[in-house]
Structures are given as structure tokens and as C-alpha cells.
Image: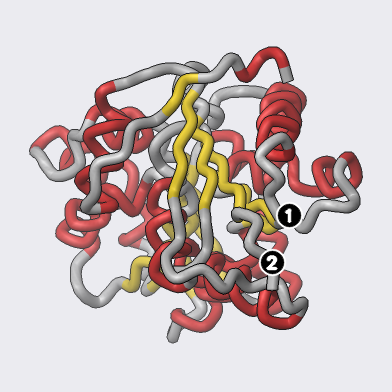
Amino acid sequence: MDNRPIGLFDSGVGGLTVAKQVMKVLPHEDIVYFGDTARVPYGSKTKETVTKFSEQIIRFLLTKDVKAIIIACNTASANSYHDLIRTFPEMPIFEVITAGVESCIAATKNKKVGITGTQATVRSGAYELGIKQRVPDMRIYAQACPLFVNLAEEGWTDNEVARLTAHIYLDDMLAQGVDTIVLGCTHYPLLKRCISGVVGEKVTLVDPAKATALKMKKFLEQNDMLSDTEEGRNTFYVSDHTPSFDNLCERLLKTHYTAEKIDIEKY
């Protein structure tokens, strides 16, 4: 047994969707979450900047004695994962791209899939590469949806502005006949109800969060690293206090949490 916490990090509030799944799948585990709310969004930043930010956050999480880390951010997963596992070789680090790829392949019936994500995630081609390596004849349509992050951060997840934005981003993809769309940013599941209304019931929306949580559970089981505490404790840190984080945290996780602000730049 290993009662040290699991670390998760994201550019802001989106990673809370991953944290929620980890809490469901691993209810006895302690979680330390960091949201980089002062520097969100990551999707418009360069690979070098995203990697620098991610390294700072991991150094912070290491001060909390975490036993494993989930990069609960598609942009950081797509652009920085390989650099991070080289920089921190002793720390088990999980990303959300692989889970999204596997879930997408399992869901599609007609081999026409859509990938949504930030500009940096789409530019990286990480989802396309992962899918094509497994299913070479898959037809893939990728679309950057940067405004979804802003809508999620503002809490505008199911109003007329959100619906119009979803139509603008997704109508061309739907016209190509996709039957599966990957929500390739952890902010996007916050708009799932809105997006579902736009794409219709015949299109499957893939959220990599649950599959990522299950991968973590399997790893902990295989390495005898599960916690034996009765109930996990959850601790939250941010780089800037924002009402959207506190409000969404309470709405999504059904419990009030107070996030502690830290100076991430010193790590």
C-alpha cells in the first residue's frame, strides 16, 4: 500500500473533469490538484512555454510527495509529455491523449471521427498520430475550438453563445459524416450538454477523463500502490484566485473546496 497522494494538473478548471473521475474510480486516494489559473489558456502558447509551465507545476507537486501524476490537460499532454518523462524519469506520469485515442477507436462504427482541441493540441497532431498508428484507414477531421475554453472558464456552458459557437466549430465536421467526436480538451466536457444538443444523439462524444482514471487505477493495482485510507482527501492549489474555479469546483464536485494560491513561478 502507498498512501501518498495522486497529483493532477491543468491550465485551469478543465482538469476538474479528470479529478472528478479519479475521485469516482479511486475514492480512497488522496488527490493534490493544481490549476494554472493565472496563465490559462495553454492552447495558444508555444510548445516550449507549455513545457516550461508543466515542469514548474511538477516540481511543485513533488513537494507534496505525490506517488504519480496525471497531466489533466490535453495541450500539455500533446506537447510536453515526452519531455516531462525524460525530465522526471522516477515519477510515473500519465497523459490523457492515449485514453482518448483508445476510447475513440472503440466508439466509432464508420471510421469517421472528429478531433476537437485547443490550437496547440490540434497543431501537434497527437490524436491523429495515435489513431492512425492503430487504425491506418481511419478518416479524421480535426478542429481547434479555442473559445470553448473561455466559455468553460466563464461558466457559459449551455447558453445561446455556447450553442452558436459549437455550430460554427462543428457543423463542417458533422457534414463529413463523423459518428464520434473526441472532446480533446479537459474543459470541453463542461460544455457536453450543449455540444450534445448540437451534434445529435447519433454522434458519440468521447471524454478521455474516465479512461485515464481507469489507467491510473490499473497502474496502482499492478504496483501495490493503492491507498488503504477509508476516504480520500482532496487538496486544491491555483496560481490565481478566480471565481470561476471556486464556483465550478463546487458545482462539479458537489462539495465546497477552498483552493490555496501559490507562486508557481518560483518552482
Neighbour class for label 2 at 10 Å: few (<14), some, many (≥20)? Answer: some
Measured Cα–Cα span from mark 1 to mark 2: 16 Å
Q: At which x and y percent is residue 57?
A: 66, 31
Q: Say which residue appears at 19% left-offset and 67% top-offset.
A: 200
The label number, if any, that marks residue 54 in the structure image? none
Residue 212 visible at all: yes
Which image quadrant is residue 46 in? top right
Residue wearing tag 1: 93
Label 1 sits on what residue type?
Ile
Reading the image, the residue beneath label 2 is: 2
Residue depicted at 49% across the width and 52% down the height: 184
- N-term-proximal mark, 1 vs 2: 2
Element under disc 2 = loop
As drawn, which residue projects farthest toward the left?
Answer: 160
Total numbered badges shown on the rendered structure? 2
Quarter-of-image position of residue 102: bottom right
Q: Quadrant of the C terminus?
A: top right
